[in-house]
Amino acid sequence: MNPQQNNNSGRQPGNDGKKPKTNVWVALTVAIIVVLLIGTIYNAVSSSQYTKATYSEFVHAMDEGQLTEVEIQGDRIIYMTKDEAAKPASKQKAFFTGRPYGGDNMQLLTELARAGVSGDSIIIEDNSTILLILYYAGMLLLTFFMVKLLMKRVSGTDGPMGMGMGKSKAKVYMEKSTGVTFADVAGQDEAKESLKEIIDFLHNPQRYADIGAKLPKGALLVGSPGTGKTLIAKAVAGEANVPFFSISGSDFVEMFVGMGASRVRDLFQQAAKVAPCIIFIDEIDAVGRSRDNRYGGNSEQEQTLNQLLAEIDGFESTKGVVCLAATNRPEILDKALLRPGRFDRRIIVDRPNYQGRLDTLKVHTRKIKLCEDVDLGKIAQATAGAVGADLANLVNEAALRAVRLGRQAVNQEDLMVSFETVIAGTEKKNTVLSDTEKRMVSYHEVGHALVAALEKHSQPVSKITIVPHTTGALGYTMQMPDEEKYLSTYEELLVELRTLLGGRAAEQVVFGAKTTGASNDIQRATALAKNMVAMYGMSEELGLMAPSSVNNSYLDGQSYMDCSQETSAKVDSAVQKMLNDCYEQTKKILVEHRSLLDEIAQYLLAKETITGEEMMAFINAEKESDDPKPTQQSEQESAASQSDQASSEENS
Ligand code: ADP
Ligand code: ZN
């Protein structure tokens, strides 16, 4: 996760607290210069209207009785003589001179009166010094704030540093102590175990140096987004009680040429000053991607990467600087980064299993008031596939909901509702479906659920709904996995295929129509069938041949094919056959249980959301009543598949 997002109180910009003050001084200087400039220009412009006269010229004109108009303006006098006034207007000249009598107006006025200048032609515009000072101060203040505002606008930050001048370290974060410990990290025991040594090293680098042991300078945390990589890195700093520097690789990408490299240098210099410490580089793939241009190289990124490599090689491992980096795409990293002495340790941060999820929920509900009815185990069970960040989010949403509804504590309903918000998006009330569409969606969803229920002989879904969600799904069937599964048998995968196709099959059986609503189901079914054929060796056509390899197992595996065109065509036809067979079987199941399908679909149409238990009630009721034939048959089928299942589980 982006380090900027959780702005803890202890966190401050890396270049200490002086930055705002510097900006004030800069703005003030600019303001003073601007005001002085304006003053000078104003003076120059206003005096250029007049002809300069000496003081004695003025006194002479006064003595001669030549003055017609006199304007006393602050520290100067502007006057007009009779000679000048007689000339045509365009040629009129005014004179100005410094003030006589040490600025004493009374004496000047007396003299003027004696010289025969009438009071009407004298204007006194007395700018007292205090007024002048106030005037300038006002100007200064105004300019100052305008300059500051301008700086903010231009840079988006509060100073000229953000404009990309000078050495910018704005996005490096340093926390003196993170306050996070391993107790805050749920699960991830293997990751914690492999980091224990680093913590011990940070506690006492000298002990390692004395023996002559070299510790790895860096470790790479690998895992999907939100699995807690940042959290773990912080916990390492917290456990070792050392400062924590963090920066995100993506911050380097938008930088001006050369900036990335200089920022890396700054970062390591800062770190060396406070060692022992931890440097955490999030999303290292943004800078560390392979330089071979396969993914589109860029020279700024290469420079940054080279600098990073140089810095890592440069620092003495005995100093106690440990560099942790996080990525979810280790396969695109430059090999140079992974060489011994660099990020040669790889620590997998996996999606949590049931126990991990339960522990994560426990960690996040520690400070939250829970009602008696809360069963975190159920939530953990329902959230298979969710990562730590999802669970943290879920708990927070639940708490917000409880507050919104004016309750003092969080109850199970809050958790379940926010589970749906986090997993399936918020309920979208404004999408209005026509009645026909609603009927279609209802049959589609029941088709999935019914096939799953009949094939698995247990309650496979926790909820069916036809309330549209923001994710774009018009309805959905929430599966309830009973236990964590690492292995699936061929038969189980076929059941899964039939369940996926159940939606489309129901549309076909009931309405004789095909809708676009099934596109996601069909994509998933195709992907699964393809894996079964090309990866798990589960088809007759290809047998044990597995031409498909997984490219990236940390993001939902994009696989690629490595085989001849012939084989590729074989795979395609095998996939098609598998899908068609499954689809026919699915339709058959639904035709046999048509009355059940109708009943449940009608019920869902009326209630919009039903639970898995409600659905099972229909199925169990039918089993006991008049229609024993198809039930028996499907029981026989499943008995066979169950025994298959048992034997293959024994084998594995
Ligand atoms: P990543 O760096 O892998 O993308 P983060 O470390 O930023 O993920 O995780 C985001 C949030 O999710 C954390 O701040 C924490 O609240 C929560 N979280 C993730 N994993 C765990 C975990 N194992 N235990 C407790 N909380 C977790
Ligand atoms: Zn569907």
Image: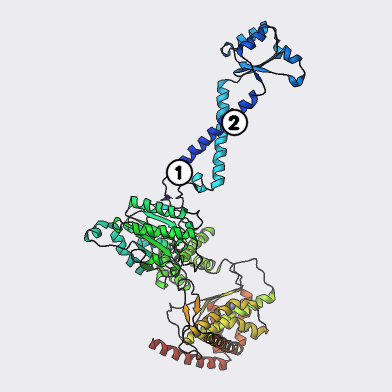
Q: Which residue is mark 2?
A: 38
Seen in the picture, residue 102 relative to 388 is either above or below; the reply is above
Residue 89 horizontal/vertical position (percent): 76, 20
Residue 575 horizontal/vertical position (percent): 55, 85
Total labels: the figure holds: 2
Is label 1 within 8 A of ligand 1 (CB to nearest ligand atom)?
Answer: no
Residue 56 horizontal/vertical position (percent): 61, 10
Position of 252 with respect to 601 (left or right) is: left
Residue type at tag 1: Lys
Residues 340 and 357: in front is 340
Ligand 2 sits in quadrant? bottom right
Position of 570 with respect to 61 (left or right) is: left
Q: Quadrant of residue 230?
A: bottom left
Residue 51 visible here: yes
Q: Which residue is mark 1?
A: 19
Residues 314 and 330: in front is 314
Image marks 1 and 2: residues in contact by CB distance under 8 Å: no
Q: Secondary structure at mark 2?
A: helix
Residue type at tag 2: Ile
Marks 1/2: CA distance?
29 Å
